Image: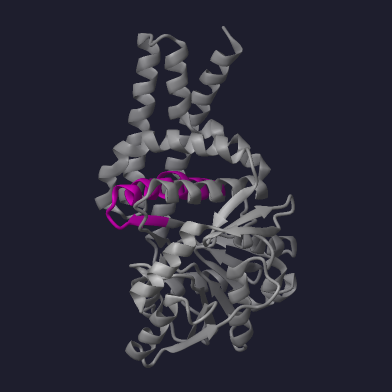
Amino acid sequence: MSLFRLLCDAGTIIGVGYYLASFIAALRFAKRARNPPAALPKIAPRVAILKPLHGLDQSLAANLMSFLEVAYPRLDCLFAVSSYDDPAAEVPAALRARYQFANITLLVGEEPDCANRKIAKVIKMADRAEKADIFVVSDADISVDRDYLLRIVSEIESDDQVGIVTCAYRARPTGSFMSRLEALFVNTDFAPQVLLSSAIEPMRHALGATVAIKRAALESIGGFRVVKDLLADDFYLGRFASQQGWRVKLSDSLVTLTFEETRFSSVWRRQLRWARTVRWVRPVSIATIFCHATFWALLLMLISGFSPASIGVLVGVVALRIGTSGVIISRVLKLPGLARDAWMVPVKDLLVVAIWLVSLVGNEVVWGGEHFRSGRDGTLRAVRRSRTSRATAESSHRAAS
């Protein structure tokens, strides 16, 4: 038996084991998430939601509204844009008129000397939120349920050693084929992987969908400025807090990421950025290639000359993958209408392998329309701005005017 055949056998077995383990972890998470949030302290801590904005898309207003409608007594909502030229600036202004009793602040401009322009806005917002006990940083493409803050605040207050609470997320596409395909990357790869990882080891990083951090924990690591030049700011906030002795906790609350992509090139660039980012911050992630049993079973069938046994293995692996993915999407992530897309998961798995291979070469990513290179320590260096992104931004601004 050849070494390559043994590798394919091992990859298939390990991948199947991973599918089953992540499936069990996801079901346990779903059971735990059914419990109502714990009671808040008598005096609820003051929370500041920090929302860095960049560009206008179809779901932005709805996403921001979901944060303004959460059930929580002491809440400040801060939004920041780089300049008034950003069409996203119009949305908080409109929401302020609609939610007249909400504490809404719009800041314009960025903290200077920050390679990470998202964190450049976060720093300005955090400096303004002087009375906040807890800061909640969340990306603009995220929407939340009404009990979102009740859960994460009760979780962060449950233990004095908990410094950060972060959330796994699910993806909801807008309807295009590409948005549905990209949603599967999150719903059948990222989310199950996060749930399994948190079940077998302590979390030492945070996820950008939600980083809820106590003021004391933030001050102990030096504030948001410690990640001003890092690409994976969410990851490092969790790592630095963990190094200072704080616990990072995965919330029972799921948040929702909206995908609107209609072009394959955009999907590819974003997934490649995520893959390269993960490789830079966690080099051991290179071993995740063995999580893709679909790929290894396909190789096994090819090198076995389409033998009946190898075909049976591939069919079994694909059936397991589609079946467990459908259950995770519908029962764990609570997206029953998207379970019909589970048939695309094996195709998506092969795309993931292709992205994994490409991510091993090069250190350039596209983020917010700009090209960056990352050093070995995770620091960012701007290279150039994408022509396509410039044209898109100008078009979006004209459409919004």
Measured as percent of width and height from the top left, residue 159 is found at 61, 69
Q: Please name whichever residue, 227 or 384, is drawn nearer the observer in this view of the structure.
A: 384
Q: Is residue 299 magenta?
A: no
Q: Position of residue 118 (x, y in %)?
A: 58, 69
Look at the image and give the residue range highlighted in magenta: 170-197
Image point (44%, 22%), residue name: 297
Quadrant of residue 128 within the rendered picture: bottom right
* Residue 33 x/y as whole percent: 41, 59
Q: Is residue 90 visible?
A: yes
348 vs 147, nearest the viewer: 348
Residue 310, compared with residue 350, is above or below; it is: above
Tell me, yes or no, whether the highlighted magenta stretch contains residue 184. Answer: yes
- Please indicate whether residue 71 sits to the left or right of residue 160 in the image: left
Q: Residue at x 36, y 84 (%)?
A: 95
Q: Is residue 371 depicted above or below 196 in this figure?
A: below
**Against 268, is 78 above or below?**
below
Q: Main secondary structure of the magenta part?
A: helix
Q: Quadrant of the C terminus?
A: bottom left
